[in-house]
Amino acid sequence: MSLGANHFRALYAADPDPWGFRTRWYEERKRAATMAALTRQRYRSAFEPGCSIGVLTTALADRCDAVLGWEVDAGARAEAQAAVPAHVRVEPGQVPRDWPEQRFDLLVVSEIGYFLDTEDLRHLIDRCTTSLDDDGELVLVHWRHRSADTPLDGDTVHAEFLSRSGLHPLVSHSEPDFRLTVLAAEETSIAAREGLC
């Protein structure tokens, strides 16, 4: 079964930064790799479900006109909202049950897919593809090691997105610890966009 809100509330009650987003070099490097993988210089509107305390959200804000972050835990949500600039909204929401009405040209699904069971993950994929603008990008970043308390692993999450979404991979990066994939409806490379090839 998918892990619900109580699982995350317990994590944040024990540690306000349970994954060390602010303190671990691993997380800082992975965040830099994520930002470097974005193929566009600027985005109109981004959505980051499961934004935690807003560290990646803040980085996304530098490249986006508007950012919506969702976080199920009230304490983490308040910390994120206090950290982000004015053009970022941090709201309560739990995917895939909840979903915003608007469309986005950047969706960031970072370290949340493996907390879902297969049925909920497929529902999330469908939600992502229907709310992604025609020129939009979907970014996936997931830990690859198997955890006893998660229904899925990162490789399975990425394989499901690749097989179900109908989107094309623009960026694919894999390390022993994490996988990073950028998917898009358009298969156009950066060089092609800029008339270099």
Image (tube, helix red, strand yellow):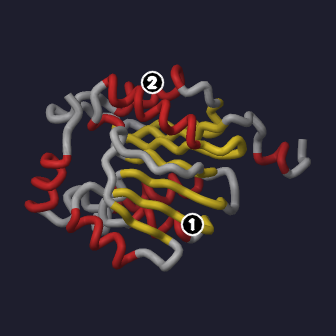
Which quarter of the figure is the C terminus placed in?
top right
Q: Residue at x 41, y 29 (%)?
A: 123
Q: Position of residue 84 (x, y in %)?
A: 43, 75
SS category of the residue bearing label 1: strand
Numbered tag placed on residue 81 in the rendering:
none
Numbered tag placed on residue 66 in the rendering:
1
Q: In the image, is 42 to the left or to the right of 154?
A: right
Quick one: 143 or 165, which is closer to the camera?
A: 165
Q: Position of residue 179 (x, y in %)?
A: 44, 38
Quick one: 184 or 143, which is closer to the camera?
A: 184
Say which quarter of the image contains residue 134: top right
Q: In the image, is 124 to the left or to the right of 116?
A: right
Numbered tag placed on residue 160 in the rendering:
2
Residue type of the residue flagged with mark 2: Glu
SS category of the residue bearing label 2: helix
Q: In the image, is 67 to the left or to the right of 193?
A: left
Extreme front residue here?
101
Q: Residue at x 33, y 39 (%)?
A: 97
Q: CA distance from mark 1 to mark 2?
A: 28 Å
Quick one: 17 or 2, which is closer to the camera?
A: 2
Q: Position of residue 191 (x, y in %)?
A: 82, 46
Q: Position of residue 143 (x, y in %)?
A: 34, 40
Residue type of the residue flagged with mark 1: Ala
Looking at the rendered image, the disc whose residue lies closer to the viewer, 1 or 2, is 1
